[in-house]
Image (cartoon, helix red, strand yellow):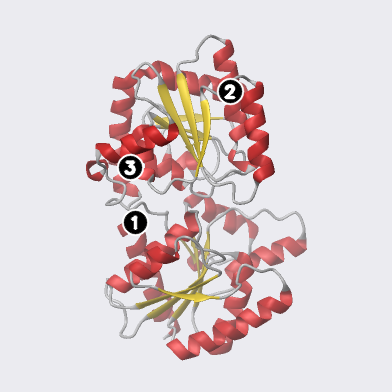
Amino acid sequence: MTLPPDFTLLQVVPELDTGGAEQTTIDIAQAVVRAGGKALVATRGGRMTARLESDGGRLAQMPVQTKNPLVMLGNAARLVDLIRREGVTVVHARSRAPAFSALWAAQATGTPFVATYHGVYNARSRLKRWYNAVMTRGDLVIANSDFTRDHVLSEHRLDRDKIVSIPRGVDLERFNPNWVTPERVEALRRAWNTPANPEVTTFLLAARLTRIKGHGTVIAAAAALKAQGRDAFRILMVGDDQGRSAYRAELASQIAAEGLEDQISLVGHCDDMPAAYLLADVAILPSIVPESFGRTAVEPQVMGRPVVASKLGGMTETVIPGETGWLAAPGDVEAWTHALGRAMEAGPVRLQAMGLVAANRARQLYSVDAMCAATLQAYEQVLGARS
């Protein structure tokens, strides 16, 4: 992809800690640098900052995560100064609160403004709909799935030509089973006390510890399976509580109350997700609210692992029932008990065959290179329309 001379992208995202929006920010920054441009990210910061800088991007640290109107005005002034000082070509906002500051700064400097809908923002009032609509007030809206695009069009009066669907991408180099050494997988086995056992089906739930991710549904389904005498399974819940210590304690108590300490482990944050997916037989994503895309339903498929996911949102696009995994009704313990049981009954040979189909499909449709190329093309489209 050829960018205009002196192209400088400014992305604005609340934090660079963990999550789909943050990973996409890093991916696009790297793509811009590789194409010969400059990549700036205005953010409060986070553990992914080192990755940004090692890829050639630059951090502009400021409190853009705030919803305080006075601080937002201050952020707008900071962004105006940054845009002028660095000669920013395009401003790209990835969350609603910082989008206000970014939009004001872009308008003040006459800079094209793009926003990505990374989630499905529900609105129960006119005020909330107005708040959400900040993401639609620029030159172009990027939706991270067809599901998200349909949601935006139903919620806002928006010209269809002003919104484009660009699915999130997975780094096919990082998530490549051929590059993951057995030592990396074994290190996680030891850390998580998960010995290899072909008689035991290992499930992996990769999601931050928050109620909407459906951990409680899986624990209840696991208890139902054990009550049926089907206890040859292990569930690894991988993810940060991000300060939600009370929710983590609640999950630990639920696990203990059901007598599932030998089956379910809360293992915390993991820096080596490719190895984590290879350690597991099946990935699960039991969200109880729609995922606009569901990156953690695609990453394991790229690694050759079938997925059990909630039947809602973007996951209905990325998981093909009976071919690359199974879909279950969100929050429905009986449905999840049945789905997990089917995965256990499938056995290693069938799971491996499904994983191969999943990997071929996901690699074709959801590569980070395709996402980056489409996003850079969207920037060119915006600049062409402006000129």
Residue hosting label 1: 368
Quadrant of residue 225 within the rendered picture: top right
Report the amino acid beneath label 3: Val
C-alpha gap between disc 1 and disc 3: 12 Å
Q: Give the SS element for disc 2.
A: helix
Crowd tier of the residue under label 1, counting other residues whose Cα lies within 10 Å: few below 14, some 14–19, many 20 or above: many
Measured as percent of width and height from the top left, residue 337 is found at 55, 21
> Which marked residue is nearer to the observer: mark 1 or mark 2?
2
Neighbours of disc 3 within 10 Å: few (<14), some (14-19), many (20+): many
What secondary structure is marked by label 1? helix
**Residue 221: which disc?**
2
**Residue visible at 50% across and 55% down?**
18
Q: CA distance from mark 1 to mark 2?
A: 34 Å
Pointer 1 and pointer 2: residues touching (CB < 8 Å)? no
Earlier in the chain: of badge 3 and badge 2, it is 2
Residue 190 % position (x, y): 38, 33
User: Taking 80 as reference, is 350 above or below it?
Assistant: above
Nearest to N terminus: mark 1 or mark 3: 3
| Label 2: few (<14), some (14–19) or many (≥20) C-alpha neighbours in 10 Å | many
The residue that mark 3 highlights is 302
Please state which amino acid type lies under the numbered disc 1.
Val
Query: Hey, which residue is sitting farthest top in the picture?
Result: 229
341 lies above or below 41: above
68 displayed left or right of 40: right
**Is 65 in front, or is 188?**
188
Q: CA distance from mark 3 to mark 2?
A: 26 Å
Which one is in front, 214 or 129? 214
Task: Tell me where residue 386 appears, x and y as whole percent.
Answer: 45, 83
